[in-house]
Amino acid sequence: MEINITQTQGIFMIALGVVLIVVCAAIMLRKKRMIRNGAHAKAVVVRTEQRRPPGRRRRPANASPFLFHPVFRFNTPDGEREIEYGVGHNKPKFDDGEAVDIVYNPTKPQELYIPSDKTPMIATLIISIFSIALISFGVFGIVY
């Protein structure tokens, strides 16, 4: 099977791949900066909120129609905070009452990161691999 990629399509693939890699690198650097400069705390899961994922109408029959977002309670120098984690999962990731290590932005405590939750980094890695494939196909399309 022969795949024909025009020069314009190749350039578009390379550009899209580069943009995606830059975005992924920015996300990874932001997380590293958060871990290095953020405030570390022990948080307790007080409840789990259910949210419908935006724009997804069809889901596998055995999948929940919701994403589960844990709500954490933790202490900051300004007092106690209760914040919903922005990353949702197909099933609850943490049990109510569970203690979890978190890192948060001291100036914006709603920006928090959970080092034990690898979901955001795995998604970033998958997008990076897809980006490298796009760039490779784009170069292949231009060269051959």
Image: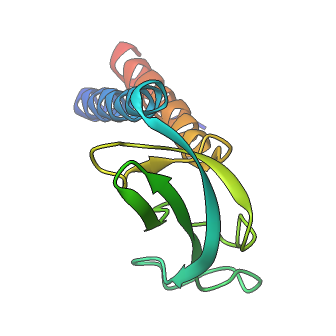
Q: Give the colour scheme of this rendering.
A: rainbow
Residue 39 spot, x, y in % from top left: 45, 37
Foreground residue among 62 and 50: 50
Q: Residue at x 33, y 19 (%)?
A: 142
Quadrant of the image occupied by residue 70: bottom right
From the viewer's perspective, is 102 left or right of 84? right
Q: Is residue 82 above or below residue 3?
A: below
Quarter of the picture containing the N terminus is top right
Q: Is residue 67 above or below residue 122?
A: below
Residue 105 shows in this picture: yes
Q: Is residue 63 above or below residue 127?
A: below
Residue 4 shows in this picture: no
Residue 131 spot, x, y in % from top left: 45, 32
Residue furthest to the left: 8
Foreground residue among 21 and 29: 29
Q: Residue at x 72, y 74 (%)?
A: 96
From the viewer's perspective, is 59 left or right of 30? right
Quadrant of the image occupied by residue 72: bottom right
> How many marks on residues?
0
Foreground residue among 63 and 111: 111
Quarter of the picture containing the C terminus is top left
Q: Residue at x 49, y 32 (%)?
A: 128
Residue 104 spot, x, y in % from top left: 44, 45
Q: Residue at x 37, y 51 (%)?
A: 111
Residue 109 spot, x, y in % from top left: 36, 52
From the viewer's perspective, is 71 left or right of 11? right
From the viewer's perspective, is 144 left or right of 100? left
Foreground residue among 117 and 55: 117
